[in-house]
Every structure is written in structure tokens, then in C-alpha cells.
Image (cartoon, rainbow, N blue to C red):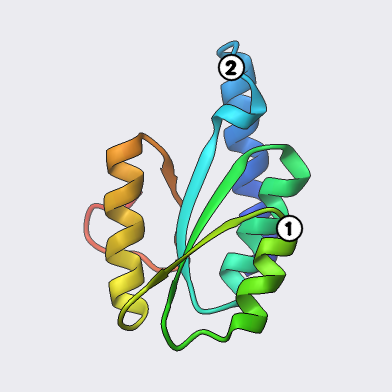
Amino acid sequence: FKALGGGLVAADSVAEAVARGERESSVTMYTASAGNHGMGIAWGAKRTGCQAVIYLGEGVSERIADKMRGFGAEVRRVAGNYEASLKAAREDAEQHGGILVQDVSWSGYE
């Protein structure tokens, strides 16, 4: 599901932007990941022409980060664990008007 979910969100988000008269590249998805979810978002973004910014905690291997970069994603490292990367992704998405795409939920997450 993680790879499929990222691709579906990217496709839907880009379709909505294009319907509003925007370019595919105007869509930016933000996420925190420890591997598979971020890979799905990176792949979906490349496939649809939008941008992906993926936050990884310090424990995630550089090999995984390089795979995400290989799909064109911007990888941002965060000191700390997954929770720290999730906090950074949420804050950045809110600040820049991007789309936060997560494979976990919390109260108020849509």
C-alpha cells in the first residue's frame, strides 16, 4: 500500500492543480519516512511531475536516502527519530502551503 498510496496521492493532487490551471510542478508533497512510504512518495512525484520533500531521521540509511533522491525527491535530514522528522515535515508543509502525506494519522489529520 505505501508505494501505491504515494502514487495515488500524487496523481490526485496534480490532477486537482491542473484543473485549477496550475502546472504539475507547482504541487509539492511533504512527508516523513523511514523508507518505504518515502520511496512511494518519491516515485509518485516523479511519475506525475510534482515535487517531493522527504524528511528522514538520522537513523535512516544513506542508501535509502539515495534511492529517494534517484526519483528526484529532495531529502532533508532531521536530528532525531521518526517523530522529529514528522514534526519537521508537518511544519514545512504548513509554512509553504504544501501537501502533507503520511502513512500514520493523528487527531485532526486529513
Instruction: Point out residue 1 in the picture as x, y percentages from the top left corner.
Output: 65, 68
| Helix, strand or loop for disc 2 | loop
* Location of residue 97 with respect to 86 vertically, above or below: above
Q: Which mark is residue 71?
A: 1
Amino acid beneath label 2: Glu
The kind of secondary structure element at disc 1 is loop
Residue 105 position in % (x across, y down): 35, 64
The residue indicated by pointer 2 is 22
Q: In front here: 65 or 46?
A: 65
Q: State which quadrant residue 80 falls in.
A: bottom left
User: Does residue 34 sit above or below 92 in this rendering?
Assistant: below
Query: Of the residues under marks 2 and 1, which one precedes in the sequence?
Result: 2
Instruction: Tell me residue 91's x, y (percent).
Output: 26, 52
Image position, residue 88 (x, y; %): 30, 61
View extreme (right): residue: 47
Question: Between marks 2 and 1, how big is the CA–CA gap?
Answer: 22 Å
Look at label 1 and name its amino acid: Phe
Residue shown at the point (62%, 55%) measured from the top left? 73
Q: Is residue 102 left or right of residue 1?
A: left
Question: How packed is label 1: few (under 14 Cα within 10 Å), some, or many (20 or more)?
Answer: some
Residue 50 shows in this picture: yes
Q: Residue at x 31, y 54 (%)?
A: 90
